[in-house]
Image: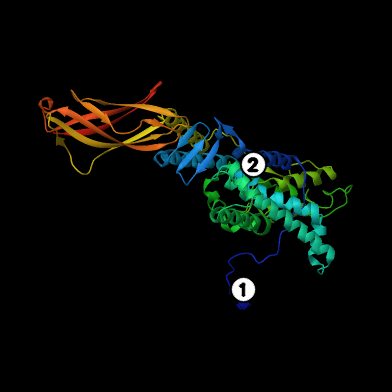
Amino acid sequence: MKFDIKEEDLIIKPYKQSGPIYIREQKGKFQKIRRVLSWCLMFAFIALPWISYQGQQAVLFDVANQQFRIFGATFFPQDFMLLAWMFMAGAFALFFITNWLGRVWCGYMCPQTVWMLLFTWVEHRIEGSRNQRIKLDKEAWHAKKWLRKGAKHAIWMSLAFLTATTFMSYFIPAKELYMDLFVLSWGGITSFWVFLFALCTYGNAGWLREKMCIYMCPYSRFQSVMFDKDTLVVTYDQARGESRGPRKRKANHKELGLGDCVDCNLCVEVCPAGIDIRNGLQYECINCGLCIDACDDTMAKFAYPKGLISYQSERQQQGGHTSIWRLKLVGYAVMTVLVFSVMVIWLNGRVPIEAYVTRDRGELSRTDYRGMVENPYRISIINKSQQPQTYQLQVVGIEGAALAVHGNLEFAGAEQKEIPVTVSVDETLLKQKVTPFKFEIKALGDAQVVVEKESRFYK
């Protein structure tokens, strides 16, 4: 047997060699849900840095000073345990949602999808419908084409710059950032990061688009691990739709030997990933439901039942029943709630003060002319609240101890100080060479804000 194999067929291509995807604008139930969620996401993203709480920006990740402020709480690097809990909770929540509804996060809430469809919306308003955009791209360059392309890219770059500036306002106080922008006094580091993020937004949402989801996002590659026969995904009812083919609206397609699919190809034209859902489940599918809206519109025009393309599980396709009360899904839900509960408990028990005790490296102890044994220490105190605090320091657990504080125990909000202290004890009261004790640091006016740190007193 002889095979006719061409040389180019032996070349392994790293990605599909295809042109741009021209997305058709589509209206419908799922598109309406997405737009509402997208507007809520963008509004929250833009508005959050402008919310003030107790006279300060409510959400600010001050990397320079290593302080992350979220409303009334200030987090320091010592609180990074919270970040671990957040990642764990987010991971289990992602497993739960994916096992239940597939890649619904990608289709409705992922910033890449939201900004990609926003840029597409701008493109549609300036260059016209899908067919008009295809025609425009095929035309030779002329004044009208230059004008439309220039206007589109100008708006894209403006949106990208606004997105990048808003993103930076989470790390630099928003009022300061925009005031410096208006007087053109941004520093080199600020300018670098803003323009880098703007370039990434412009490139990802305007040019790479679906390639980010298909080739660069790891989620699309390992999502199938979390799928099972009960996961709801966008599905084409092949038994009902085949054999597909065009027909007149009033024709009896059953007599023609055709299924309900009229082969209009709208499900492909509206897909942000450019796939044909009729070929079965593909990892490129982001579960956005645009093809469902397009197909339902076509079914309505032909007076066919809707749902030829719908959210269904593999079990439902086989005539079975899918229940949310299944072991894997319930397990993911329980773990999500459990991790979130632990995180809330940890936050509720968090004391807005942190302290560290170190001994003076010069000498362990010394004895003065009165026979008092002195041990020098350095206590580093962090005020984790955003309000000024005055602390009281005392020694607990060692008889006859006298404490000398060589510094000010008044702290501004989110301030950190290192306070030298000296503990003195009459030598006759010391029964052993090393005596354990505790430093107790208490906030004046708030008895609940107290922390104890163990140390040792050397004779």
Observer able to see residue 298: yes
Q: Badge 2 is on which residue?
A: 46
- Give 40 or 247, whichever is nearer the viewer: 40
- Give 433 or 269, whichever is nearer the viewer: 433
Q: Badge 1 is on which residue?
A: 9
Q: Quadrant of residue 34?
A: top right
Q: Secondary structure at mark 2?
A: helix
Please provide percent x and percent y for residue 175. 60, 41
Asked whether disc 2 touches disc 1, contact meaning CB atoms under 8 Å apart, the reply is no
- Give 333 or 234, whichever is nearer the viewer: 333
Please provide percent x and percent y for residue 429. 12, 25
Observer able to see residue 5: no
Q: Which amino acid is tagged 1?
A: Asp
Q: Nearer the viewer, mark 2 or mark 1?
A: 2
Q: In the rendered view, would you say 84 is above or below 11? A: above
Q: Is residue 436 left or right of residue 340?
A: left
**Label whose residue precedes the other's in the sequence (2 or 1):** 1
Please provide percent x and percent y for residue 365. 16, 37
User: Looking at the image, which residue sits at the far right?
Assistant: 250
Q: Is residue 402 left or right of residue 181?
A: left
Please provide percent x and percent y for residue 200. 61, 56
For the C terminus, the image quarter is top left
Q: Which mark is residue 27?
A: none
Work out how far the residue at label 2 is from the one at label 1, CA to CA, in angstroms.
Answer: 49 Å
